[in-house]
């Protein structure tokens, strides 16, 4: 089985003035293609840092991160950006749509940045995805005219529009009510199945784990364990000794 | 290519929508840019137009494109507009022919006009003197038996009328000021002139009385103001040819080879014309050309007041017949029973908006034909006295051939204050050593027994070679008295030579003598600075060290005026755009900071840094182009309106700058291009810092739950 992502003994330190704050301490993690991987852990456990490293928006202080066969620490700014554009899709906790563009334009944006397709091809792809996420009728709307769930659907469409190998979702359901959250998870799972796209999402919501192919639990910048979804749910979602 | 275009489209779209999203900020920034570009368009169009019109004025009136003068001169040359009335101290260039040859050897030089600038005080005839001279002449002819009785009586009446006017005038002054304002001697003199005794014996023996009147009374009529005249000595033909805006108004040009004087029409009107008439003209101009009203303009009211109080000027011109005629005319016009003409005149000149036009025409149609409107008439001889370069007084009597204007500059005193004189007479007044003068000086020296003594030998020559107390053997001490007398007679004879100044001269003399400066007309005005270098080089090569200066410099303060306005304009533009730069920069920085998560998102989903830079640049440029064009368009509209309406020249300085009564500025593409370039440059520059800021935004900014 190919590893789309391979994190090996990675540490990441942030300099806050004089103080060096370790965010990750010797994390190793392999993600196979087609996984629907949840990264769990409380605030400050290093979930987002790990996603940043995997998402190529940051590079490790030590250790190596390999994404789609490329070691990110060896890449320059522009190559990292290109890697993000072509290989990775992002779904953010607060959706992060471009407020001045319409739904359709938001979804089309990564394709435009790629400069690989014609207007017609883009149009078809965007509408197809909007259909898939169920908001085609809102294609002309501005994000501010949509509900939270609808916005996240737009974000999902945007993340998938370039057919990335990997989609990273940072707390995708945190800003949604539980019903909408469930719908979004169902959608993501369905796309994971149908498009064979690898999903990695961070969450500290125990209900989400049930959807994951596996749950990696982080605590204090270290991988606690890697368990199946059932185990994680049984364990109350938290690493050993931590009540919910 | 398509991809680039589509990306650009999305960049533009994002940029424009961002601008729209923060409308207020955009409008404020845009407003400043709009105002700035409007100012640039209107300002540069105006200044360019003034520059063009003024250069027409300066080049076309006196200066020519380039002025040259001797590099040895003490002062810098200015041909017009100097604040002090003194002419610059220039070292003459001895040989004009050589100068002309040298200048014409420069390819771009088309014509050369010799020049010299100076000024003189000139006494123009005193009315009383003129009247007394006529009376003396008539008395002589009457005594000789000619039949001039009627004219003689009228002239006698006129003199008595003058005495009456002076007497009344004196009483007035004494009343208004105090008893001592006028000396008792003058009071007595006027009383004597009015007395019956003086006139009783006049018919049989007029000469003692005339002498008394000429010596004691004429000086009291202080209407004989000195005229201060600035004049330009030149080759009048060449001048008229090179400065083709020159037009003769009255009289004729000075004929070739004749000495003569041409009044600048402006000087002629302002200084030589009857003051009352001049003030009426000014009031008329104020009403008809500058839409003033007597009721509201203090200036017009002041002139009217002066006209009503200073009727003496007219009264002195009226003899018995004219007094009667004026009385009849004025009584009829005013419907008055008043018999005192002075009071009638005062009443007549007390005009208001309702009756001014009628009275103005009445004055010129009915009264003026009986008056001498100008103290010096075309055809008169004018005696010009001037200090020569070496400091003695030289005078030349010249015929006044006429008056002239520069077309389009009729009402400008800057172009109108220079009168013209033939070059030969100018040299005479300037004290140049013309061949005949050199001969004359030689004669005087010979007669006075002078000899050249070198400085080294002067002591020995003057005080004897031995230092023993021997008698100094200076030749002149032993000259017989009669030879000194001959020398004096010769000096007196000079007066006659000066009178000969009205005789023709050989036109070749124009070429031979010296000049102070010369105007150069070039073929291609675009190459003036190169031509100046060429001229100075040619001068150096020919052994005539020359300074050549542009018309701007030659016209002194006037020429620098436009440079000054331009500087002020550019500085204000600079300030406005500096402010605009700061404001646009701040607005964009704020926009960038507000949009950090959005920019981070764009970076995260794969936008390169240059995408963001382009986005901000497009935002700045969009505002710049939109509002800059709007401003330029509005500016062009304003210039168009001003062009159609014209800016009236409110005073004579503006008249000169505008090269006419109205400035019709026109828009050149350069004005708009400059404006838009500045706007675009400012927009681009102001997006640099926010661009850098945006480029530093990390894609991590998109992840809000950063732990």
Image: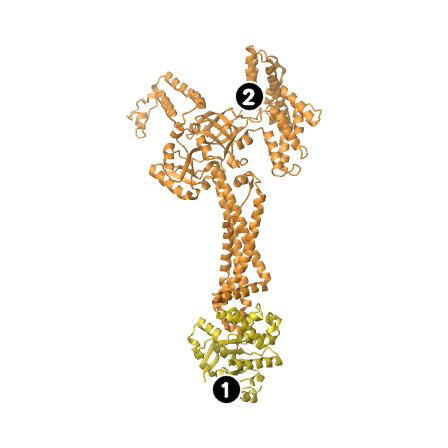
Chain colours: A yellow, B orange
Residue B80: % across, % down: 48, 37
Chain assignment, label 1:
A
How far apart marks 2 and 1 lie (CA) works out to 130 Å
Few, some or many residues within 10 Å of mark 1 (<14, 14–19, 20+): some
Chain assignment, label 2:
B
Horizontal side of residue A82 vs B160, given as left or right: left
Please, is residue A165 above or below residue B128 in the view? below
Q: Which residue is mark 2?
A: B130
Badge number at residue B340? none
**Kind of element beneath mark 1:** strand
Badge number at residue A226? 1
Please, is residue B420 above or below residue B134 in the view? below
Residue B536: % across, % down: 37, 40
The extreme left residue here reads B466
x 60%, y 80%: residue: A183
Give B448 or B667, whichever is nearer the viewer.
B667
């Amino acid at each position: 089985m190919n590893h789309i992502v391979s994190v090996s003994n990675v540490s990441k330190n942030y300099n806050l003035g004089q103080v060096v704050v370790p965010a990750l301490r010797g994390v190793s993690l392999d993600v196979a293609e087609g996984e629907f991987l949840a990264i769990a852990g409380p605030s400050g456990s290093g979930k987002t840092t790990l996603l940043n490293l995997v998402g190529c928006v940051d590079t490790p202080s030590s250790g190596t991160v390999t994404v789609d066969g490329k070691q990110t620490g060896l890449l320059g700014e522009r190559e990292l950006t290109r890697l993000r554009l072509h290989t990775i899709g992002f779904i953010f906790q607060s959706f992060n749509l471009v407020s001045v563009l319409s739904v359709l334009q938001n979804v089309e944006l990564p394709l435009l940045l790629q400069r690989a397709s014609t207007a017609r091809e883009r149009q078809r792809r965007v509408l197809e995805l909007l259909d898939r996420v169920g908001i085609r009728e809102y294609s002309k709307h501005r994000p501010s005219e949509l509900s939270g769930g609808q916005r996240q659907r737009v974000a999902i469409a945007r993340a998938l529009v370039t057919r990335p190998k990997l989609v990273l979702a940072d707390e995708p359901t945190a800003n949604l009510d539980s019903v909408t959250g469930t719908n979004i998870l169902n959608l993501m799972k369905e796309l994971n199945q149908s498009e064979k796209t690898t999903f990695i999402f961070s969450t500290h919501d125990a209900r989400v784990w049930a959807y994951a192919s596996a749950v990696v639990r982080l605590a204090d910048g270290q991988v606690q364990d890697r368990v199946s979804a059932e185990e994680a749910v049984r364990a109350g979602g938290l690493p050993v000794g931590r009540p919910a | 290519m398509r991809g680039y275009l589509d990306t650009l489209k999305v960049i533009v779209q994002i940029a424009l929508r961002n601008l729209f999203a923060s409308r207020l900020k955009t409008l404020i920034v845009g407003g400043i840019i709009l105002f700035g570009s409007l100012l640039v368009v209107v300002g540069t169009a105006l200044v360019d137009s003034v520059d063009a019109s003024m250069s027409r004025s300066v080049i076309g009136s006196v200066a020519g494109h380039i002025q040259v003068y001797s590099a040895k001169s003490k002062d810098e040359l200015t041909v017009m507009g100097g604040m002090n009335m003194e002419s610059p101290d220039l070292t003459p260039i001895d040989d004009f022919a050589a100068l002309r040859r040298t200048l014409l050897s420069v390819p771009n030089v088309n014509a050369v006009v010799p020049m010299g600038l100076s000024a003189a005080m000139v006494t123009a005839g005193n009315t009383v003197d003129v009247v007394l001279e006529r009376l003396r002449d008539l008395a002589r002819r009457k005594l000789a038996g000619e039949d001039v009785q009627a004219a003689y009586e009228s002239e006698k009446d006129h003199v008595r009328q003058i005495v009456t006017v002076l007497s009344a005038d004196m009483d007035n002054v004494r009343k208004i000021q105090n008893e001592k304002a006028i000396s008792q001697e003058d009071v007595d003199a006027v009383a004597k002139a009015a007395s019956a005794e003086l006139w009783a014996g006049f018919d049989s023996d007029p000469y003692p009385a005339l002498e008394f009147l000429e010596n004691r009374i004429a000086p009291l009529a202080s209407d004989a103001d000195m005229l201060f005249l600035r004049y330009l000595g030149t080759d009048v033909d060449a001048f008229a040819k090179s400065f083709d805006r020159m037009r003769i108004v009255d009289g004729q040009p000075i004929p070739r080879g004749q000495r003569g004087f041409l009044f600048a029409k402006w000087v002629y009107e302002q200084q030589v014309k009857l003051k009352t008439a001049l003030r009426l003209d000014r009031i008329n101009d104020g009403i008809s050309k500058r839409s003033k009203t007597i009721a509201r303009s203090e200036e017009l009211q002041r002139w009217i007041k002066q006209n009503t109080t200073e009727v003496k000027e007219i009264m002195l011109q009226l003899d018995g017949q004219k007094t009667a005629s004026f009385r009849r005319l004025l009584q009829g016009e005013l419907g008055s029973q008043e018999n005192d003409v002075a009071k009638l005149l005062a009443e007549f000149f007390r005009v208001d908006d309702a009756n001014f036009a009628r009275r103005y025409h009445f004055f010129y149609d009915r009264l003026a034909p009986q008056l001498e409107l100008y103290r010096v008439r075309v055809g008169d001889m004018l005696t010009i006295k001037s200090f020569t370069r070496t400091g003695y007084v030289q005078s030349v009597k010249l015929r006044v051939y006429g008056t002239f204007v520069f077309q389009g500059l009729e009402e400008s005193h800057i172009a109108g204050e220079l009168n013209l004189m033939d070059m030969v007479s100018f040299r005479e007044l300037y004290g140049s050593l013309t061949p005949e003068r050199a001969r004359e000086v030689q004669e005087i020296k010979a007669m006075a027994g002078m000899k050249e003594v070198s400085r080294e030998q002067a002591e020995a020559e003057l005080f004897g070679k031995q230092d023993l107390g021997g008698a100094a053997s200076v030749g002149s001490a032993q000259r017989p008295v009669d030879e000194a007398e001959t020398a004096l007679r010769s000096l007196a004879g000079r007066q006659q030579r000066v009178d000969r100044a009205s005789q023709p001269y050989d036109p070749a003399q124009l070429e031979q003598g010296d000049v102070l400066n010369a105007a150069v007309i070039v073929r291609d005005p675009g190459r003036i600075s190169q031509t100046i270098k060429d001229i100075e080089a040619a001068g150096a090569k020919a052994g005539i060290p020359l300074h050549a200066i542009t018309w701007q410099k030659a016209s002194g303060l006037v020429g620098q005026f436009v440079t000054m306005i331009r500087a002020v304009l550019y500085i204000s533009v600079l300030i406005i755009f500096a402010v605009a730069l700061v404001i646009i920069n701040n607005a964009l920085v704020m926009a960038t900071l507000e949009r950090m998560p959005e920019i981070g998102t764009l970076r995260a989903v794969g936008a390169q840094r240059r995408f963001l830079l382009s986005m901000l640049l497009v935002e700045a440029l969009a505002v710049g182009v939109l509002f800059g064009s709007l401003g330029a368009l509005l500016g062009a509209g304003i210039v168009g309106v001003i062009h159609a309406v014209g800016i009236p020249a409110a005073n004579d300085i503006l008249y000169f700058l505008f090269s006419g009564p109205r400035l019709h500025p026109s828009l050149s593409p350069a004005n708009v291009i400059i404006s838009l370039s500045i706007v675009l440059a400012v927009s681009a520059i102001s997006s640099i810092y926010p661009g850098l800021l945006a480029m530093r935004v990390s894609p991590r900014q998109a992840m809000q739950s950063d732990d």
